[in-house]
Image (spheres, grey):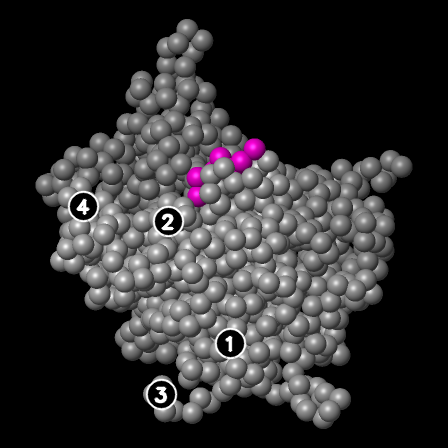
Amino acid sequence: MTDTAVPLTTKKDWSSDQEVRWCPGCGDYGILLAVQQLMPELGVAPENTVFISGIGCSSRFPYYMNTYGMHSIHGRAPAIATGVAVARPDLDVWVITGDGDGLSIGGNHLIHALRRNVNLTILLFNNRIYGLTKGQFSPTSEIGKVTKSTPFGSIDPPFHPLAVALGAEASFVARTHDLDRKHMMETFRAAHDHRGAAFVEIYQNCNVFNDGQFSEITRKQQRDEMMIDLVHGQPILFGAEGQRGVTMGADGQLRLVDVSEVGLDHILVHDAGRDDPSLAFALARLSQDDHSPTPFGIFRAVERQEYASAIGAQLAHESERKGPGDLAALLRSNGTWQVGNTN
Amino acid sequence: MTDIAQREAGESESTAVTVGGGAGEHAESTVLDRVVVRFAGDSGDGMQLTGDRFTSVSASYGNDLSTLPEYPAEIRAPAGTVHGVSSFQVHISDHPITTPGDEPNVLVAMNPAALRADLNRLEPGGTLIVNEDAFDERNLEKAGYTAPDGTSFNPLQDGSLDSYRLIRVPMTSLTKEAAAPLGVKPRDAERAKNFFALGLVSWMYTRPTEPTIDWIGQRFGKDELVAAANRAAFLAGYHFGETTEAVGHRFEIKPATTMPAGEYTSITGNTALAWGIVAAGQLAKLPVTLGSYPITPASDILHELSKHKHFGVRTVQAEDEIAAVGMALGAAFAGHLGVTTTSGPGLALKSETISLAVSVELPLLVIDIQRGGPSTGLPTKTEAADLNIAMFGRHGEAPLPIVAAKSPVHCFEAAIEAVRIAVKYRTPVILLSDGFLANGSEPWQLPDIATLPDIAVPFATEANHTAADGTPEFWPYLREPDTLARPWAIPGTPGLMHRVGGIEKEGDGTGNISYTPENHQKMTDLRAAKVAAVARDIPPVEIEGDEDAELCVLGWGSTWAAIDAAVQRRRRAGVKVAWVHVMHLNPLPSDLGDVLRRYPKILVPELNTGQLARIVRSAYLVDARSLSKVQGLPFIAREIEDAIDRLLAEEAAS
């Protein structure tokens, strides 16, 4: 829609009458607000929008949206949403999941939804902890994390969600965080407009079981030095003056450098549309912890055949070739014979 | 009762009449009312194809028939071993029959392993046709024909087969000879030996040759040399029968004129199920979306449905069983007929999602083609031991309707019935079939499509409640009074946006989350009452046989064929037997308890260890006795006959 168009809906039209029941101070509130505020701008109708979630704190999300929705079972949201999207390509289908739901119990469904490129907008709330079960480590928790189930520190190496998504051939991969509504809305809008599976990792603070996990990066006063904003077609720079940047060494390794040392010409120019995902993969793994500069924005956005459209094309092709399905003809398709007098 | 009366003349011992005339030098052919032929060979010998061809030709010739394919779980088990034996048994007749036959009258053994594996099936004095070329030392050893001193021995030479009518045919060498002039490589020529066997048996049973010759052309048309070799082998086998004294007699099984007049096709249970789903989608006016993960013996339904895209059928081969049912449920939420197909291990994996479907009250068709379990069990063999998991295999109180198919043909009707219940009551339904039905084939009198039921239900289109302030609202759990079904409002419908989920929800109205004690009690009762209400919507039980008998056989699923044959035979022998076969396993027909209580003796034959027997004992406090078989094989009629006799004798003694 153009900037001058009057939105057909307002935020109120997208908010259900249910009381929001996350812990006070939870990062999820900010994400909900960003989505509810964005929806009127997308020019879509609540009745044509479906939110499917799994289990976990974030998965309560659909109850708060005045759309069609299903709060399903642990890890299965991408599979159920695939069923919705395959049946009804006319709908906008969103998947709400978390680091435990999407990457642990439901990892298989997530990677296959991405591989198939089903037209889903997948928001993964990553807080690096199991909140709903009251504080066990998650598949994105760092090694050494002390939780109720790891009193001597976690020994499980973590997943990098974006690297997982890229490894699964995702056509759209982005990262945002719960403290910047504008950045969230821009990222969600791009994800929504992407035709195919769009995967967005949201750094989300769990103020009860894992408070401050991302604050070294996402606090306002840290952002200039710690957040690397990926802008398509622009050199990858960060720092208050854009004085630092990302470059690729002769060994193929990405490094953080001072621009003055290497010169702007040697700073990588971000290309989200690159067909080869290896650079996006390297960017996704640039930061190995939550204490160093971390890229945000759209890592990859490429066009690939969308799954339900491909199904629709086969259906249309076969209907054209054979005509509409004729049940009587189907029952006779293996040959028939007559018994007795049939005149 | 009509059904059984039509089959009355059915499962008797074969009767033979020798008549004059007929083909060529063999002036005589003997008319039989039925024959059971079993083709057995190595997995690589093409026995399934051979049996299938013999079946198709017999079907189009007009015989009634029933088949039992049996094959190993390994795609290519070690060649020449008993593990690798693949068999196809087919029963053809001139009158209505239901079973693939207790004992083959003819066994075709392509190698020593096949002889060793299947000889005990052959009727005493039956005809045994062996490929004697395969009986060399190496194959005899592999098949285990070894003496204690380690040397092999040949059963063709030691007199051990004297009680059978043994026909030794050098099939491999004759096939090679027939194919040699065509320039076919010896290896390719040898592979055509199953067509030699088919040709020989086709001659013996007076089958027309043209359909098979035409079929070879179609099937192998791309490789003319292979087609030519198969054709040559088939004709060589046929002519071998005609010209040699070894085979002797020819037999004839006339078309089954006592079958109801009409148009027939030959169909397997899995194909009938797939077509039943296509039909159900049309009758319910819903597009079909299938989510499925490949698993034996259910995969053929996925294959079949994947062909029919011009019917609007969407199929997704999912990443796993859980995703498959999830996709089906998602499609149902979006207004499609959501279907998932699997076998036992897959049903276990789908359990949690089926419980979600119970909770969100959406239509969902879950099809379980049962096989031997537990775990991987006997993937290619039949069993019906998933009744318990279908009934009870979910967490919490999660009842759902269960429908079971009783024959390959019946799979079509059962699919429509399962969908009718699912969409009308907005509930998941489990449809049980099994490996025997899935792969077995029989003739099917095509239904008149116009007579198929209309099972369409309307989607919700408008608000169904008025708020205190007068504004119209949509309550997703406001139920229909008769069915207790909630409205099915699909995305895209303005004003009816709503959320469903697995958390307990407010009883019979808003569907909002509710954890109150009274509400959970009410919801649990409502979900049970909804499934129980289906009983008002299914026909009363039909008692076949003698209503005034002392003994009633209670059956479900694929035991139908063997029970049918057993009940007929016992009744012809003067024994009074009643029989009830249930299609709806949950809820059971409402009069079943009353019917069963009339009989002092109840026999429940099942391919499990008594799962329905336990259910009816607990539901009706009747002394139902289990006849159990878990050997990966269907019952043969005699096993049930014997059990009937034993149970009646027990009563007489007491």
**Residue A153 colored magenta?**
yes
Pointers 3 and 2 within a single chain: yes
Determine the residue positioned at 29% across, 59% down.
A238
Disc 1/disc 2 C-alpha distance (Å): 31 Å
Q: Tell me residue A241's x, y (percent).
A: 27, 62
Around disc 2, counting alpha carbons within 10 Å, would you say few (fewer than 14), some (14 to 19), or many (20 or more)?
A: some
Q: Please give the residue where the numbered disc 1 appears in the rendered image.
A: A36
Q: Please give the residue where the numbered disc 3 appears in the rendered image.
A: A3
Disc 1/disc 3 C-alpha distance (Å): 18 Å
Q: Which mark is residue A292?
A: 2
Of badges 1 and 2, nearer the viewer stands 2
Could you tell which of marks 1 and 2 lies nearer the N-terminus? Answer: 1
Q: Please give the residue where the numbered disc 4 appears in the rendered image.
A: A249
Determine the residue positioned at 19% across, 35% down.
B187
Majority secondary structure of the magenta segment?
loop
Comparing A67 with B523, the one in front is A67
Q: Tell me residue A266's x, y (percent).
A: 15, 54
Q: Amino acid at mark 1?
A: Gln
Could you tell which of marks 4 and 3 lies nearer the N-terminus? Answer: 3
Assign a secondary structure to mark 4: loop
